[in-house]
Image (spheres, rainbow, N blue to C red):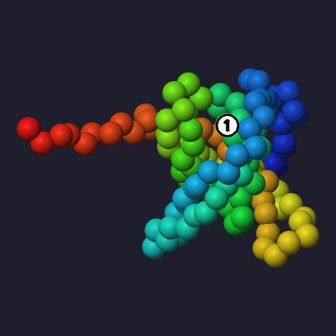
Amino acid sequence: MENIMPSQQERRGSERISFKQAYPYELMRGAGAEISGGQGYVINQSAKGLLLMLPELVDQKQVFEIRMLSDASKEQITKLMEVRWMRPVAVNMPGNLHLVGAHVLFELPATQDTTTEPH
């Protein structure tokens, strides 16, 4: 099966918004469910995806979560993402960075404070 990369127009079905912000992420690897994570740097986003830089190698179709601020309410939300593609980025610093295109699978609602006062 041939891996044909879609044209820029086909990939971008909606407007992209420049974002440039670091957010925490977590991903699971392997059958042992090893969890790793760190800070992902979101470059831009659309209604259906993110373009971000991650400090670790990820696989195509790998699922991870990222905690961001909601566009509307500015409350913290968690997005479950699937990696669509990944490219290494050459940088003059220790470690590696990877440019990642990811698709939003699911967005959890913003967490609400459920603390109750004693009566």
Q: Position of residue 49 (x, y in %)?
A: 67, 37
**Which corner quadrant of the image does residue 91 belong to?**
bottom right
In the rendered image, is residue 61 in sight?
no
Q: Residue at x 70, y 66 (%)?
A: 56
User: Residue 37 versus residue 60: which sits nearer the camera?
Assistant: 37
Task: Judge from the rendering whether residue 99 lies leftward or rightward of residue 39; answer left or right.
Answer: right
Task: Judge from the rendering whether residue 108 lies leftward or rightward of residue 52; answer left or right.
Answer: left
Q: Amino acid at mark 1?
A: Gly
Secondary structure under badge 1? strand
Asked if residue 36 is positioned above or below residue 20 in the image, the reply reads below
Mark 1 crowd level (few <14, some 14–19, many ≥20, 10 Å Cα) = many
Toward the left, the furthest residue is 119
**Which corner quadrant of the image does residue 45 belong to?**
top right
Q: Residue at x 79, y 63 (%)?
A: 97
In the rendered image, is residue 82 in sight?
yes
**Residue assigned mark 1:** 49
User: Residue 101 versus residue 95: which sits nearer the camera?
Assistant: 95
Number of numbered markers: 1
**Which corner quadrant of the image does residue 110 belong to?**
top left
